[in-house]
Image: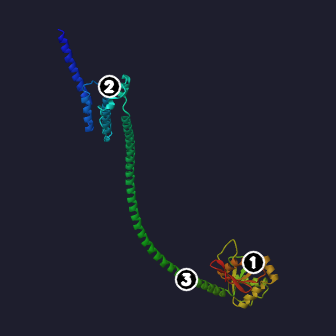
């Protein structure tokens, strides 16, 4: 009966040893990416130590290394998934598999369960650096994406503006073409107008010369007519201040005036025609014009009216005697009278003959077309 438990114990020990050797071989087996000479070294090391069981601390260290490796692989998978969601290709990373069979793995200091748990939860520094780089890349990619979106919006706005500018440029080109056509048309029209204006200027100059000639001729003719009219009135005298009645005899009135007022024998004075001049008016009396048959008789009567005593009597009676002149000469005397007074104030000798004013026997002014002009 005692031999049975012993046999069972030995078989159990053999199974445990076999299981331990398998685990040791599994732990010492090389991962992918190791060199062949390292695999050989690990194999030789494994064969030399198969007879010995691994210490618990070494076994825990190996397990921790496996945990770090698989945690990193999981983080790499997560990175690949995130990068695929961001439409970015993950950076290719290849890491050499740690050689868990290297002697340094067995020389590490045994760690407590708390340290082992902390090592399992904390990624290695090189993994933290890679993860920080990945975060930086993600942040940069997001910023780049935002910038690209802004650039895309700006480009779209620029395209719209360029389209508007293109339309406006086309419109401006059409307008310029229209303006150019109109300009050429107006230029030709203006050229024709300039030719017409030149022709009209020539005609105007010619007409001005003709008008000047006509004006000179008209002035000459008017002077001649006025002179002829004046000569035709050379024997006439005007008598002013006589009452007017319907049954009067103008010749008797004139001869009575010559005899009684001027004190000249009138029986030998012959008058060709005597009458009142101008339209009848109740407000004033019309003058009497008398045409003497003899010019000497006319002059004798005229000069007698300028004798001082007779002139005073005529002024008292509001009567007068004067030479009959043409209408132009009468208007000229009225217009030239102020100028003659100015010249007389300067002790100049002034005479008005016809429509001209003479100062010291030199013609200075002339009445033409209703205005006084200087004679050069």
Who comes first in sequence, dot 2 or dot 1? 2
Crowdedness near tag 3: few (<14), some (14–19) or many (≥20) residues, C-alpha within 10 Å: few
Residue 314 visible somewhere in the drawing: yes
Q: Is residue 230 left or right of residue 147?
A: right
Front-lying residue, 105 or 312: 105
Which numbered tag is attached to residue 342? 1
Residue bearing the label numbered 2? 60
The location of residue 152, given as percent across then percent down, is: 37, 47
Write the residue at 73% across / 79% down: 340
Q: Is residue 227 left or right of residue 47?
A: right
Of the 4 image quadrants, the one containing the N terminus is top left
Colour mode of the rendering: rainbow
Residue bearing the label numbered 3? 209
Write the residue at 37% across / 40% down: 137
Question: Which one is closest to the eye, mark 2 or mark 1?
Answer: 2
Which numbered tag is attached to residue 96? none
Q: Mark 2 to mark 1: distance in Å?
A: 148 Å
The location of residue 107, given as percent across then percent down, is: 34, 29
Who comes first in sequence, dot 2 or dot 3? 2
The location of residue 12, given as percent across then percent down, is: 21, 17
Front-lying residue, 339 or 250: 339
Q: Is residue 25 positioned above or below 282 on the image?
A: above
Of the 4 image quadrants, the one containing the C terminus is bottom right
Residue farthest to the top, as pictured: 1
Front-lying residue, 125 or 56: 56
């Amino acid at each position: 009966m005692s031999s049975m438990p012993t046999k069972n114990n030995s078989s159990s020990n053999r199974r445990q040893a076999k299981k331990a050797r398998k685990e040791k071989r599994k732990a010492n087996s090389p991962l992918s990416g190791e060199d062949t000479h390292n695999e050989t070294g690990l194999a030789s090391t494994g064969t030399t130590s198969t007879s010995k069981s691994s210490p618990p601390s070494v076994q825990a260290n190996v397990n921790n290394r496996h945990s770090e490796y698989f945690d990193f692989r999981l983080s790499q998978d997560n990175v690949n998934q995130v990068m695929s969601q961001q439409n970015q290709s993950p950076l290719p990373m290849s890491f050499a598999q740690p050689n868990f069979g290297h002697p340094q793995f067995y020389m590490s200091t045994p760690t407590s369960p708390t340290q082992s748990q902390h090592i399992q939860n904390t990624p290695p520094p090189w993994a933290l650096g890679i993860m920080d780089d990945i975060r930086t890349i993600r942040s940069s990619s997001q910023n780049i994406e935002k910038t690209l979106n802004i650039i895309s919006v700006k480009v779209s706005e620029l395209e719209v503006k360029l389209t508007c500018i293109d339309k406006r440029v086309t419109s401006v080109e059409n307008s310029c073409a229209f303006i150019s056509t109109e300009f050429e048309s107006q230029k030709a029209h203006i050229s024709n107008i300039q030719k017409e204006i030149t022709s009209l200027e020539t005609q105007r100059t010619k007409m001005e010369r003709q008008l000047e000639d006509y004006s000179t001729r008209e002035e000459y003719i008017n002077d001649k007519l006025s002179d002829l009219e004046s000569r035709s009135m050379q024997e006439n005298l005007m008598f002013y201040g006589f009452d007017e009645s319907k049954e009067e005899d103008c010749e008797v009135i004139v001869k009575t005036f010559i005899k009684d007022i001027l004190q000249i024998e009138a029986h030998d004075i012959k008058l060709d025609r005597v009458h009142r001049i101008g339209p009848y008016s109740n407000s004033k009396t019309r003058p009497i014009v008398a045409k003497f048959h003899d010019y000497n008789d006319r002059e004798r009567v005229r000069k007698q009216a300028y004798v001082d005593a007779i002139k005073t009597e005529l002024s008292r009676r509001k009567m007068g005697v004067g030479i009959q002149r043409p209408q132009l000469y009468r208007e000229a005397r009225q217009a030239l009278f102020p100028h003659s007074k100015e010249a007389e104030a300067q002790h100049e000798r002034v005479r008005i003959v016809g429509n001209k004013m003479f100062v010291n026997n030199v013609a200075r002014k002339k009445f033409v077309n209703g205005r006084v002009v200087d004679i050069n």
